[in-house]
Image: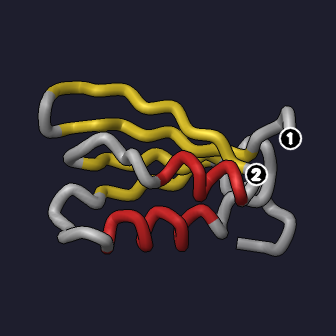
Amino acid sequence: MNQGEALSSLFLDVRSLPAPEPLHQILTSCNQLQTADDVLTVHHRCYPCLLGDRLRQRGLTMAVQSENDELFVITIKKDTEA
């Protein structure tokens, strides 16, 4: 990928990772979000209660959708209102 080129979409599945590895993997992957069009979609096995504050500190927002008791789909992108 060329510098300045939009990533647009990145996917990460952390359901099989032991804590605190999902949090670390998600935050590391967030470093790749460069533009407002870039989106990170994460599959997690539980609600990411520790993630929201850390994302806000980085100028990012998240939306969480519960598919069932074992799958939470997290969408992360740059906060365009910050």
Q: Are marks 2 and 1 in contact (CB under 8 Å)?
A: yes
Question: How far across and down, in percent of the image, does residue 67 sit?
Answer: 24, 26
Question: How far across and down, in percent of the image, does residue 10 sit?
Answer: 52, 54
Question: How far across and down, in percent of the image, does residue 8 sit?
Answer: 66, 48
Question: What kind of residue is marked 1?
Answer: Ala
Question: What kind of residue is marked 2?
Answer: Gly
- Tell me: 7 left or right of 48: right
Looking at the rendered structure, the secondary structure element under dot 2 is: loop
Decide which of 11, 49 is in the foreground and name it: 49
Q: Quadrant of residue 30?
A: bottom right
Looking at the rendered structure, the secondary structure element under dot 1 is: loop
- Residue 3 shows which numbered tag? none
Q: Quadrant of residue 70?
A: top left
In this rendering, the answer to whether 40 lies above or below 33 is above
Say few, some or many: other residues with alpha carbon within 10 Å of mark 2 (under 14 / 14 to 19 / 20 or more). Answer: some
Say few, some or many: other residues with alpha carbon within 10 Å of mark 1 (under 14 / 14 to 19 / 20 or more). Answer: few
State which tag comes first along the sequence, 2 or 1: 2
- Tell me: 54 left or right of 25: right
Q: CA distance from mark 2 to mark 1?
A: 7 Å
In this rendering, the answer to whether 13 lies above or below 73 is below
Which residue lies at the image location 39% right of the left edge and 58% below the top edge? 12
Decide which of 18, 6 is in the foreground and name it: 18
Which residue lies at the image location 43% right of the left edge and 40% below the top edge? 74
Which residue lies at the image location 56% right of the left edge and 39% below the top edge? 62
Give the colouring mode of the picture. Answer: secondary structure
Q: Quadrant of residue 22?
A: bottom left
Name the quadrant of the C terminus.
Answer: top right
Task: Quickly name the residue at label 2.
Answer: 59
Task: Quickly name the residue at label 1.
Answer: 82
Name the quadrant of the N terminus.
Answer: bottom right
- Tell me: 36 left or right of 73: right
